Amino acid sequence: MFECLPHKWVTPAELREIVRTGTGDRRVVYGVQVKSDAMVERKSDGGFNREEYYKHPELYRPVFAERVRYCPQIHCFLLKR
């Protein structure tokens, strides 16, 4: 459904800039793909290893809201499979 709307895929850095400068197009829905390393970090040292994370998620803690500073601007989360 998202892709049926006027939309634009941007990087996390581009979305931060759009929010910071207010230069977004209000006629477009912006989509950004956030990868696992932006959502969690290893509890012991703050690192990230994708293979380890999927095998042992209990070793990781959520950090999405801390790292993704545009979080207050997000109105909807969509999971893309």
Image (spheres, rainbow, N blue to C red):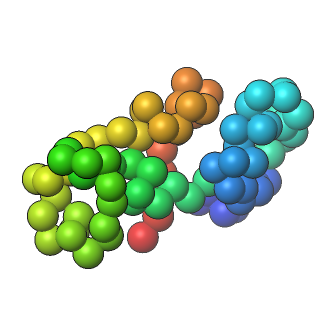
Position in image of residue 31 (x %, y %): 64, 52
> 30 or 52, which is in the foreground?
52
Would you identify the image quadrant in which residue 8 lies?
A: bottom right
Is residue 31 in view? no
Q: Residue at x 77, y 28 (%)?
A: 20
Q: Residue at x 14, y 71 (%)?
A: 55
Position in image of residue 14 (x %, y %): 75, 48
Please determine whether, in this image, residue 81 is positioned above or below residue 42. Answer: below
Please determine whether, in this image, residue 10 is positioned above or below residue 65. Answer: below
Where is the C terminus found, in terms of image quarters? bottom left
Position in image of residue 41 (x %, y %): 31, 49
Please determine whether, in this image, residue 60 is positioned above or below residue 52. Answer: above
Is residue 19 in view? yes
Q: Is residue 38 left or right of residue 18?
A: left
Where is the N terminus found, in terms of image quarters? bottom right
Q: Is residue 53 left or right of residue 56?
A: right
Q: Residue at x 41, y 40 (%)?
A: 64
Q: Residue at x 79, y 37 (%)?
A: 18
> 7 or 59, which is in the foreground?
59
Would you identify the image quadrant in which residue 54 lies?
A: bottom left
